[in-house]
Amino acid sequence: MKLPPLALALTSLALASCARPAAPAPAVDDDPRFACRVAVSPLHTALRTAGGDRAQILRPNAAADLARLSVNARYRFVLDGDRRFAIAPMPDDAPRNPYDHPVLGGGSPVRSAGGLRVLHANGRVERVVLDAQSYAYCTTTESLRPAVRALVALGVDAARITAEGRPFACAEAAAPPRYGPIMVRVGQRYELLGRAIVAGRWELAGYALHELDEELDELPGATPPEEVSRDVLGPALASLRQRMPALAQAVTARDAAAARAAYAAASTTCNACHAAAQHGYLVVPSTPGEAVPSSSPDDAATPADAAVTAHVAPARPSRAGAPCNDRTGCGGGLVCCTHGGAYTATISHVGRCMGLRACNTQPSAARR
Ligand code: HEC
């Protein structure tokens, strides 16, 4: 068949348009949605009681909106069924923060839920760190994929996004024992041990020591308070346990002087851990027979407390190199650098103030 010239021209135009690169295929909707595992209405009631409002939830439209969040503070977020972010209007640790994940998600299934930290300077997002910790949605780290894609769609460079991969607690999992209740018992046993030593009641002292030992056995599997890094707990527990044989020997030998010395030595290690765990105000007395923990005003400014103050500056320091914690952060355009260059490891909360760039290039070994 012979085509007229116009038809030929049209055909080649059509061919030319076919040769253009194909438009990206629409994303396959294969990201699972996670159902909420807890009752939502009590949380909505709590939201109203706290003066909160779902209208306050942040719904970013562009990367620049993320630069309004406090630098490096963890904010709870969900990625809803339509892949839109809903971010709590206050940091995770704000007092009486009522914006739980189910509130953010309205109780509906979500694509992703967890925490988000943004490092930014001059309105530019330098880094986003995601975690999949949601007690109510029980999301997995894998669920962060659509969140990463949504961040990229907002204009965040994918290379600036990292995720913290570790297992998190879920509402339905049998909760592991928590540090606090074990520590209450440790304190009781230790106080009883001290009183028994003072009274020369050696059998009672032996019993208290045995019970104390059993409580200490529980600690490695227990969940520490959220703000305490596990990194500091292991070594601190080990140094306490090294003091136990001397205590046991003194009690068995019914040697009051040796028992008092061993008690004082063990108390030092209790206090060292409390200081490292940012609980330096929990002072364990070195003298047996006294209440545990001490509430004496004399103990308020012990070396343990001083160590904590040195580590965790209460105000917002603005001098480069000053100790800081990532709750209060730093002033003067500095960030509280608590990590090495890679933001993927466990979060530690104590650091030093420095410029963002300096922080980003810190070797990971130079943490804290
Ligand atoms: C490995 C770290 C570590 C060691 C070692 C340690 N503690 Fe603790 N202790 C903690 C932490 C962390 C808390 C705070 C728990 C919380 O807030 O849930 C705590 C809290 C306490 C409390 C307060 C409990 C309460 O809520 O009323 C007492 C009492 C206590 N510890 C006693 C002791 C004694 C006595 C020793 C030594 C024999 C000791 N601790 C050794 C980490 C430690």
Image (cartoon, grey):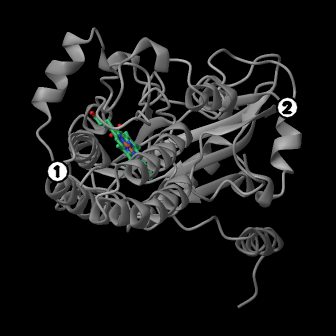
Q: Nearer the viewer, residue 261 or 1?
A: 261
The reply to whether residue 193 is visible in this rendering is: yes
Q: Earlier in the sequence, mark 2 or mark 1?
A: 1
Cα gap from disc 2 to disc 1, whole angstroms: 44 Å
Q: Residue at x 25, y 58 (%)?
A: 209
Of badges 2 and 1, the one in the foreground is 2
The amino acid on which the numbered mark 2 sits, given as a three-letter code, is: Gly
Q: Residue at x 57, y 28 (%)?
A: 327
Q: Residue furthest bottom?
A: 1
Taking the image as shown, residue 51 lies to the left or right of residue 63, namely: left
Q: Residue at x 56, y 57 (%)?
A: 231
Q: Residue at x 16, y 61 (%)?
A: 174
The quadrant of the picture showing ligand 1 is: top left
Q: Nearer the viewer, residue 24 or 156?
A: 156
Q: Position of residue 276 (x, y in %)?
A: 56, 42
Q: Nearer the viewer, residue 293 or 345?
A: 293
Give the crowd class for mark 2: few <14, some 14-19, many >=20 residues within 10 Å: some
Disc number placed over residue 12 in the picture, else none: none
The amino acid on which the numbered mark 1 sits, given as a three-letter code, is: Arg
Q: Position of residue 269 (x, y in %)?
A: 50, 48
Q: Which residue is mark 1?
A: 37
Residue 175 position (above or below residue 197): below
Q: Secondary structure at mark 1?
A: loop
When asked about the image quadrant of residue 181, the answer is top left
Q: Position of residue 280 (x, y in %)?
A: 50, 31
The C terminus: image quadrant:
top right
Q: Which residue is mark 2?
A: 321
Give the crowd class for mark 1: few <14, some 14-19, many >=20 residues within 10 Å: some
